[in-house]
Image: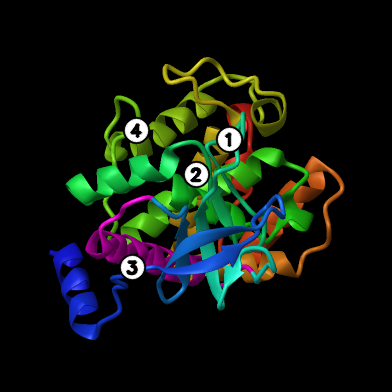
C-alpha cells in the first residue's frame, strides 16, 4: 500500500521522468562520454546511449532513489556535498559506467556525491525492478559510502565504515518504503536477520573483545562467511536501537564535533562520547568477557 500511494503521488505530481536527456559525464576516471540522464529531484541515473529502458520504469526507479536519498538525510541529519565529476545539476549521480573494475561491482565516493556501477550490474538492477518492483540493494549500500562523513573521527576502525553502509541500507530502505530483492539464497529479511546472528556469535565467544573481532578478524566462522564488517553493521544497528529515530542524528552531530582519531581506541572513545551526548551509554557495546 505504501509503494502504491507513493507511486500514485509521483504520477499525479508529474515528478516521474519519462524521457532521458543526453549530457556529458566525465566520471571517476575523468574520461568524458555522452550519457543518457534520467533526472529525479535528488538523484540522476546515467546510462550509456544505445541501451533501451522503459521511461515509466526508469521514472519509478529514480523516484525510489530520490526517496532513499531523502531518507538517508533524515536518518543521519547530514548530507554529502557535491563533486565536480559526479553532481548533475545539483543532483547526486548513479552512473552505469562502461569502465571495467576487476574488484568491485560498484563504487561510491566516500563522503561525497557520486556512485558508479560496473560490468552488467545496472541492467540486472533494472530487470529485477521492472519485473518485481524490488531493489538490488547495491545502490543504497553505496549511498552509505556517500554519506560516510565521519572518517576523521572513526576511520581508525575500518569496519565502522563498511558496517555503516551495511546497517543503514536496511534502515533507509524501510523508511523510504523500498522492497529489497533476495541476496544469494536469502530473502532481504533473512539478510537483515543475519546481522543478529553475527552479533550473537561475537557476544557468546569467551574472551573475544572488540579489537579481536573488529581489527583482527578473530570472530569465529559464521555459516554465511560474515566477518568484521558485518559485526560492525550489527553494532551500528544496536546503536540505532538505543538512540532511536531522534537520537541517531544527534549522535552524528555530536560525532562531527569530536577530534580526529589516530588510533582505534580513540575512535571508540569518540563513538562512546557521541552516544553519551545523544543520550545513550554505548560503552556496553564494546565490553568483553564476563562484563558483557
Looking at this view, is 209 or 87 the one in front?
87
4 vs 3, front mark = 3
1 vs 4, front mark = 1
Observer able to see residue 190: yes
Using the image, determine if residue 53 lies above or below residue 41: above
* N-terminal-most mark, 4 or 2: 2
Q: Are marks 1 and 2 in contact (CB under 8 Å)?
A: no
User: Which quadrant holds the C terminus?
Assistant: top right
Q: Are marks 3 and 2 in contact (CB under 8 Å)?
A: no
Observer able to see residue 238: no
Q: Main secondary structure of the magenta part?
A: helix
Q: Which label sits on residue 135?
A: none
Residue in the picture at 60% in, 52% down: 145
For residue 77, what is the image quadrant? Answer: bottom right
Using the image, determine if residue 65 lies above or below residue 218: below
| Alpha carbon distance from label 1 to label 3 | 25 Å
Residue in the picture at 50% in, 25% down: 226
Q: Are marks 1 and 3 in contact (CB under 8 Å)?
A: no
> In the picture provided, is 181 more to the left or to the right than 202?
left
Q: Residues within 10 Å of mark 3 (few under 14, many from 20)?
A: many
Residue position marked by numbered label 3 in the rendering: 63
Q: Are marks 4 and 2 in contact (CB under 8 Å)?
A: no
Instruction: Give the residues drawn in magenta, as a range.
Output: 51-80
Mark 4 element type = loop
Mark 2 element type = helix
Q: Residues within 10 Å of mark 1 (few under 14, many from 20)?
A: few
Q: Which label sits on residue 104?
A: 1
Q: Are marks 4 and 3 in contact (CB under 8 Å)?
A: no
| Alpha carbon distance from label 3 to label 2 | 22 Å
Amino acid at each position: 500500500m505504501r509503494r502504491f500511494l507513493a507511486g500514485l503521488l509521483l504520477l499525479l505530481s508529474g515528478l516521474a521522468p519519462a524521457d532521458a536527456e543526453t549530457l556529458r559525464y566525465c566520471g571517476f576516471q575523468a574520461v568524458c562520454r555522452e550519457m543518457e540522464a534520467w533526472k529525479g529531484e535528488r538523484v540522476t541515473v546515467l546510462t550509456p546511449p544505445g541501451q533501451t529502458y522503459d521511461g515509466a520504469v526508469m521514472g519509478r526507479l529514480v523516484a525510489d532513489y530520490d526517496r532513499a536519498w531523502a531518507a538517508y538525510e533524515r536518518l543521519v541529519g547530514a548530507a554529502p556535498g557535491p563533486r565536480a565529476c559526479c553532481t548533475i545539476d545539483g543532483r547526486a549521480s548513479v552512473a552505469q559506467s562502461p569502465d571495467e573494475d576487476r574488484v568491485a561491482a560498484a563504487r561510491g565516493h566516500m563522503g561525497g556525491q557520486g556512485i558508479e556501477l560496473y560490468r552488467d550490474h545496472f541492467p540486472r538492477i533494472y530487470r529485477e525492478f521492472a519485473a518485481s518492483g524490488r531493489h538490488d540493494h547495491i545502490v543504497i549500500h553505496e549511498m552509505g559510502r556517500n554519506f560516510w562523513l565521519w572518517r576523521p573521527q572513526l576511520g581508525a576502525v575500518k569496519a565502522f565504515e563498511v558496517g555503516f553502509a551495511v546497517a543503514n541500507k536496511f534502515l533507509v530502505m524501510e523508511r523510504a518504503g523500498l522492497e529489497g530483492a533476495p541476496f544469494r539464497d536469502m530473502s532481504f529479511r533473512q539478510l537483515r536477520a543475519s546481522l543478529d546472528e553475527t552479533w550473537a556469535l561475537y557476544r557468546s565467544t569467551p574472551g573475544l573483545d572488540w579489537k579481536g573481532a573488529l581489527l583482527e578478524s578473530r570472530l569465529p566462522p559464521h555459516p554465511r562467511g560474515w566477518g568484521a564488517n558485518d559485526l560492525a553493521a550489527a553494532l551500528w544497528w544496536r546503536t540505532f536501537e538505543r538512540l532511536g529515530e531522534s537520537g541517531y542524528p544527534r549522535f552524528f552531530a555530536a560525532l562531527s564535533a569530536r577530534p580526529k582519531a589516530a588510533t582505534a581506541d580513540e575512535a571508540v572513545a569518540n563513538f562512546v562520547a557521541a552516544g553519551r551526548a545523544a543520550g545513550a551509554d554505548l560503552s556496553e557495546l564494546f565490553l568483553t568477557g564476563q562484563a558483557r
